[in-house]
Amino acid sequence: MDLKYLGLKDIGEIRRNTPIDDLVQNSLDRGEGVLGMNGALMVDTGKYTGRSPKDRFIVDESTTSHNVWWGSVNKPISIDVFNVLMDKVVDFYNKNNDGSGVFVFDGFCGSDPETSLPVRFIAKKAWQAIFVNNMFIRPTTKELNKFEPQFTIINASPVIDKEWTSHGLHSETFIIFNLERGIAIIGGSEYGGEMKKGIFSVMNYYLPLKGILTMHCAANVDMNGENPALFFGLSGTGKTTLSTDPNRLLIGDDEHGWSDKGIFNLEGGCYAKAINLNKEAEPGIWAAIKHGALLENVVFDEETKIVDFSDSSKTENTRICYPLDHIEASLFAQGKPSRSEHPNTILFLSCDAYGILPPVSRLTPDQAMYHFISGYTAKVAGTERGVTEPQATFSPCFGGPFLTLNPLVYARLLREKMEKHGTKVYFINTGWNGGSAMSGAKRISLSKTREMVTAILTGDIEKSQFIKEQVFGLDVPMTLNGEEDPILIPRNTWEDKSAYDQAANRLAHLFRNNFKTFVIEEPSLETAGPII
């Protein structure tokens, strides 16, 4: 193959869609990582162990700028600066021909062949080629022979921009997308998630303009491939864990589209959080760790290579990257496409560290729109010195950092599709109950949350009588599987009821202030519940 159309002329051997066994060996030979648990490759991603959103920019040009949601998420950069940094990236590849060649992966984003995007990734590191091989949809030989990329990411992680101040950047690191040319360049960060979420942002631009909703969510079906459900939630809320259910078949754990035909996975793999991974609680993810998988930034014994999943000394954001066929209970592993009919059920997940939200509640369509736009979770305090209270996080559409268009575009599409297909929406709190995370209260157990999710998906939850709690106006079941459960009504689990009331009012205030940032044109959104 020829990469001269990108200006890459003297780069040595081009290793295109290299078999996974060879990529693993290449990575070992280059000292990029070591073999660990069940033959999985363990790598460190260097300075950056997570995405660098402040270093992400979109080229401000005439063909796409009128559609982009400009602001703190999508920051503009001039075409002149892009060209300067593009030249630096090209020079890096052309002038660093050390005989090791480059790795190219050609594949697809989107399991619906009518809307999938042919994507190309170019990297110098073998493990980065493993990452995209796992995360995107691998083409057949026939597809590869006629492959024409529509979007290309050139990963030049060793390249930095020393003139970043004059270029208007945030630091020496840069992740820049040129939607007009269909090219993105990465410099200064090795973190693989920049490539994954970068293409998701691209799909969040193209597909909604065609009436297809892109979603930061997981999806699964029952063992007959029916009764599809979507799981929306920010990192740490249990999206991957709850959707990877041994009693259901996984469609995907993170990114999906919803078209007139149904829902479909955008990816070919999973990128699960590894911190505190437990075999008994998450058997599907545990079993996915084997040859071909990547373990990122985990702490392990240098001699035995045994991983300590509870050790966050490198980062809280330890990760496992693996292809979908590593999950036995998945449609892909069953030889079926990663897509299904329209979802019957949507679950919004929140890890409420304040201990205020009910563990399970039912939403009206208006409430669903309100909470979709809010995208709430609350992180546990203690990760930074001096922080003594939980930290509320609001991320529109449960995926704010990846939205390229205004959040209301996605919200309107969701409303239209929910109404057309009669989809029900429930709210699940996977956080604390009986007090805040700092009070000594306990987090709701995974087994209890799974019980609630199962009751929703089987319809048994509707056998309960529901009452309306007074702060958020949510419909809360009185029983679970026919039995009363004290945790269902959060206020009842707090010893100090006045403390609950005060904390609940503070949280409602945070919701109201966040919601003011959106210009709401549909009046029905303003009747979502008492907190408005």
Image (cartoon, rainbow, N blue to C red):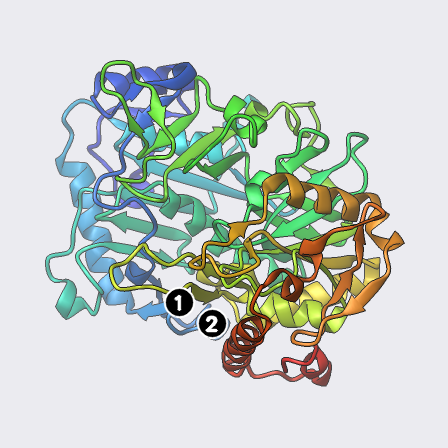
Q: Is residue 19 visible?
A: no
Residue that label 1 marks = 74
The one nearer the camera, 420 or 330, is 330
Q: Could you tell whether 462 is left or right of 141 in the image?
A: right
Question: Badge 2: how crowded within 10 Å, few (<14), some, or many (20+)?
Answer: some
Residue 242 percent coordinates (x, y): 62, 41
What is the number of the mark on residue 444? none
The one nearer the camera, 329 or 209, is 329
283 in relation to 83, above or below: above
134 in relation to 368, above or below: above
Q: What is the three-letter code of the residue carrying label 1?
A: Asn
Dot 1 or dot 2: first in sequence order is 2
Residue at 57% in and 39% down:
241
What is the number of the mark on residue 69? 2
Question: Badge 1: how crowded within 10 Å, few (<14), some, or many (20+)?
Answer: many
Residue 304 percent coordinates (x, y): 28, 14
Write down the quadrant of residue 411 in the picture.
bottom right
The one nearer the camera, 344 or 37, is 37
Label count reads 2
- Quadrant location of the N terminus in the rendered image: top left
Label 1, label 2: how far apart the Cα atoms are? 6 Å
Asked if disc 1 and disc 2 are in contact, CB closer than 8 Å, the reply is: yes
Residue 237 percent coordinates (x, y): 53, 51
Q: Could you tell whether 239 is left or right of 526 in the image?
A: left
Q: Could you tell whether 205 is left or right of 465 in the image?
A: left
Q: What is the three-letter code of the residue carrying label 2?
A: Trp
